Image (cartoon, grey):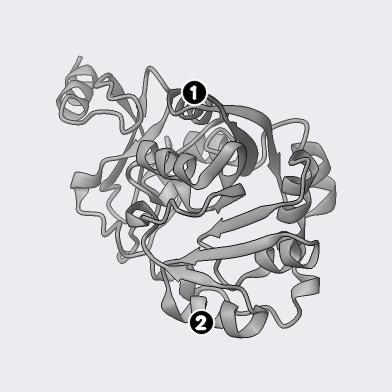
């Protein structure tokens, strides 16, 4: 009874950021003192970080400083795999926009294979690197504030960006505006229903097995997706799912995860409809 009262007090004060439902329950916690709470929506299944906990969610600098420019773009296997996945499910060569393009590794492969390419990046330093190294134009902007719908694309990528954005519906609206009629979008993000995540949530029920966090830890993800919540988001915003799979950077697990969707990372191709 005490447990039920606790959950009622907590989730009545927030709505799901995809569907607006206020029937959420505490799914798991993170942080040195378990102070960061993630709530799962009973309708669309999105896992929402309770942003009122004081998370410095706008400070995403660690995601741009943890990586280094590739010494050889040709050897960037992760970027090549992303290119191959998108190219496999998009029938034509055309125009391509990479949102959150980083050092431009995926742009490199699209440009090499005959696409007209462009990047969008929050970091001006990364944007300069891509332009001077690859000769690819990159606009510097916060994606959710980006206002350049004069140019539309056949394919747009949002790789490991969606989970950092508080407003997923706005992100899909923005992507829709950037796509040509029947255009495609390519997404990559963590899979909250992966086997690894399920095991960790089970371990966290036992104090001695809980994951340990540094006192300075702050979560970077606002929203955590499963196939079910992602598909709900798509249908709500005028997209249809073409292909969903999970993946690994290791060849054998990757082969398994592509067909048995228990990997920690997911990728999808979707198409604009209507």
The residue at the point 44 percent across, 29 percent down is: 237
- Sequence order check: which comes first, mark 2 or mark 1? 2
The residue at the point 46 percent across, 81 percent down is: 125
Using a 10 Å C-alpha cutoff, classify the residue at mark 1 as few (fewer than 14 neighbours), some (14 to 19) or many (20 or more): few
Residue pointed to by mark 2: 128
Residue pointed to by mark 1: 235
* Cβ–Cβ under 8 Å for marks 2 and 1: no
Q: Is residue 142 visible?
A: yes
Where in the figure is residue 42, as x and y percent of width and height?
37, 18
Q: Is residue 58 above or below residue 255?
A: below
Q: CA distance from mark 2 to mark 1?
A: 36 Å
The residue at the point 41 percent across, 56 percent down is: 148
Q: Dot 2 lies on which element?
A: helix
Q: Nearer the viewer, residue 149 or 191?
A: 149
Query: Is residue 208 shown left or right of residue 166?
Result: right
The N terminus lies in which quarter of the figure?
A: top left
Using a 10 Å C-alpha cutoff, classify the residue at mark 2 as few (fewer than 14 neighbours), some (14 to 19) or many (20 or more): some
Q: Quadrant of residue 270?
A: top right
Query: Is residue 179 shown left or right of residue 36?
Result: right
Q: Nearer the viewer, residue 100 or 3?
A: 100
Where in the figure is residue 254, as x and y percent of width and height?
78, 45
Q: Quadrant of residue 265?
A: top right
Q: Is residue 110 above or below residue 158?
A: below
Residue that lies at the very extreme toward the top in this rendered image: 1
Q: Nearer the viewer, residue 154 or 192?
A: 154
Where in the figure is residue 236, as x and y percent of width and height?
43, 24
């Amino acid at each position: 009874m005490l447990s039920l009262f606790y959950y009622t007090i907590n989730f009545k004060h927030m709505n799901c950021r995809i569907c607006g439902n206020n029937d959420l329950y505490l799914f798991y916690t993170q942080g040195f003192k378990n102070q960061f709470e993630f709530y799962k929506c009973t309708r669309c299944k999105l896992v929402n970080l309770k942003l009122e906990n004081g998370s410095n969610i706008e400070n995403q600098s660690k995601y741009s400083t943890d990586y280094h420019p590739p010494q050889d773009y040709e050897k960037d296997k992760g970027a090549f795999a992303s290119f191959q996945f998108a190219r496999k499910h998009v029938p034509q060569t055309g125009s391509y926009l990479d949102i959150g393009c980083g050092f431009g590794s995926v742009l490199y492969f699209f440009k090499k294979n005959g696409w007209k390419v462009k990047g969008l990046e929050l970091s001006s330093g990364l944007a300069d690197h891509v332009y001077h190294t690859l000769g690819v134009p990159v606009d510097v902007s916060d994606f959710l504030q980006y206002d350049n719908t004069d140019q539309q694309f056949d394919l747009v990528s949002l790789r490991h960006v969606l989970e950092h954005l508080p407003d997923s519906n706005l992100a899909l609206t923005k992507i829709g505006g950037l796509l040509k009629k029947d255009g495609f979008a390519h997404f990559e993000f963590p899979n909250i229903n992966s086997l690894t995540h399920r095991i960790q949530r089970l371990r966290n029920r036992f104090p001695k097995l809980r994951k340990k966090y540094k006192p300075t830890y702050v979560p970077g993800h606002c929203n955590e997706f499963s196939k079910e919540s992602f598909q709900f988001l798509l249908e709500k915003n005028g997209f249809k799912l073409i292909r969903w799979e999970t993946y690994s950077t290791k060849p054998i697990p990757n082969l398994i995860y592509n067909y048995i969707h228990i990997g920690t990372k997911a990728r999808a191709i979707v198409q604009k409809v209507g």
